[in-house]
Amino acid sequence: MAEPLIAIEHVEKVYRRDALEIPVLNDVNLEILQGEFVSLMGPSGSGKTTLLNLIAGIDQPTRGRIVIGGKDIARIGQSELARWRSRTVGFIFQLYNLLPVLTAFENVELPLLLTPLKRAERRRHVETALKIVSLEDRMDHYPRQLSGGQEQRVAIARAIVSDPAILVADEPTGDLDAKSAEEILVLLNRLNAEFGKTIVMVTHDPKAAARAHRMVHLDKGVLHADEQTEAGAARKA
Amino acid sequence: MKFFNLVWRNVFRKKTRTVLTTGSIVLVLVLIVVLTCLLQAMEQDPSGNRGSNRLVVQHATGLANFLPLSQRQRIEQIPGVVAVSPQIWFGGVYRDDKPENFFGQLSCDPEIFFTKLFDDATIDPAIEKEFRATQNSFVAGQSLVNKFHWKKGEHIMLRGTYIPVTLDLVFVGAYRSGDESNAFFHNEYLNQAKWFGANRVTGIYYLKVADAADLPRVTSTIDKMFENSDAPTKTLTEKQFQASFMEMMGNIKGLIRWISLIILFAVTLIVANTVAMSARERVTEISVMRTLGFRPGHILGFILSEAVLMSLLGGLLGVVLAKYLFVPGMVKGMATTPMAPFLINFKVTGSVLLAAFLISVGVGVLAGFVPAIRSSRIRIVDGLRQVV
């Protein structure tokens, strides 16, 4: 069997509020292979966003290991983790979270400002990313001049512009109408199939979850079920 | 530089707020530049060092008391003294009591005044000759003449205040000098009027010493000479004498410095509030940037840069307004007031520009420091959860 790209081993997460300890994840074990599209499902408070944050390296587990690409990211310092994130993970948020003062082009360019790329090279990368999400004609538009679906596509372009191996998406269709949501899911499927991106997506929507290869169910911080979807079965076949 | 665009856009994210905050910095910088330049001007010699060998002898108890005219001869005999002119500050009313009609009215000895004492002033020899020859004549600084539009041969009436006489003076011409706010007339003309001090007393003695190195010796000789007389003296350099007028108003320099510090502190709080509000509104955005790989140091740098940029913009505009509008305007507006001698060196110097730059940067750093530290320490997951 192939080495997993993401290996979560006996992970626990406890939040502390003053003297109160709130367990959020309890002995979670999960493996995700390179090129897989996994959806995390579960009721509110089940710990799925926390698990996503741990995979993305923006939060640290209380116990356990999170090994991504052979590196235990729970054991590395904040600065190195920031550099690792910028190279390895692309983020897609429910509310897009574009910077309103920057144009679509500038928003997508943002992660590249941390690289040694020259201005012309950055432009080439940004134009490519915007072309993939079919927004090359909107690059000078500010977020307020775009629809919700377009904003989310810009956010996806920002997530893929530095060519990360993993995309993490937290309810990427949660704030969109059905048509825009479908467009985003098609785009995610394309990024997974054509560009080989490993995608971990948190969603409440069973239809959206069905677009993934696997559905992982969490409840009260415990992993309850890990099932293959029809899309996953078709992929294997 | 590749981050400058982001910093610039964030500074102008809320234009009204930025304009108001920058406006407060502009006002403060104008005030500080003007006050600092005024302080510098007050500390400099109005004659451009040409008056460095002139002394003023006044009564030891102050300008309110007269000195006997008999002292003149004894002062003239001190080795090194070139010329001595008794002078009285007449302080009369011209036209009416309105402050704009007030100007310096001083008696002098016309025989030596422009030739030996105020030889740094420029006066047409024909005017100087006529001034000496005509006992009821007066000459005035060009700025004062321009203000009152006096024509040659024009009579003016000065109604005395503490000296109960009215002078009828004839204008003969103007002189040019660093300080053009005064009018000079004959001691003799004042002595001919009937008042208690006529031919007996003077307000001060203005004198010139051949060598500036002799000033300490001449100063102590004069003061020792009259130490035990009915009219003890206090001898000052011209610069000290002019500065003493400011001291009459109390420790004005100290006051100005304290006021400057207080308003600087106030504007720092204003900028800090603006930066803090701006940073607070962007907690989620800052967290998103952190997810993209920006480190706490980047965030600290951005917020601090925004504060410094805003402060520098205000500072720059303040300096430009002070240099090209307020300072020239004040110099023009006060050219004929008693403040005129202090305005000769009233200009925005390189050191003031440097100070204004450092103050602007300092205000920005101080104001941005706490919000920048706080923003850089936000935990990403907390920031992403926050609903603003």
Image: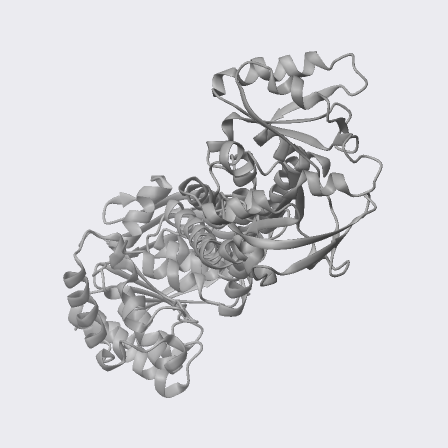
As rendered, which of B14 and B370 lies closer to the eye?
Answer: B14
Report the side of A25 relative to B77 (left or right): left
The C terminus of chain B, quarter of image: bottom right
Residue at the image position 33 percent from the left and 48 percent from the top: A82
Q: Residue, x 61% and y 61% (percent of image)?
A: B148
The image's colouring method is one colour
The answer to which quarter of the image holds residue A209 is: bottom left
Place of residue B373 in the rendered image (x, y in percent of width and height, measured from the top left): 49, 45
Please state the total of marks drawn on the protein image: 0
Residue furthest toward the bottom? A179
Q: With A175 as the anchor, is B191 left or right in this view?
A: right
- Image height of B55 relative to A41, above or below: above
Q: Is residue A105 above or below residue A62?
A: below
Between B306 and A203, which is closer to the camera in this rendering? Answer: B306
**In x, y percent, where is residue A14?**
52, 47
**Does residue A142 appear to the left or right of B233 in the view shown?**
left
Q: Position of residue B3 (x, y in %)?
A: 31, 56
Q: Nearer the viewer, residue A43 or B361?
A: B361
Percent across and percent down for residue B262 are 64, 44
For the residue pair B360 and A80, the one nearer the viewer reads as B360
> Is residue B340 among what the camera can see?
yes
* Residue found 65% across the figure and 35% down from its top: B254
Residue A93, quarter of picture: bottom left
From the viewer's perspective, is residue B48 above or below residue A12?
above
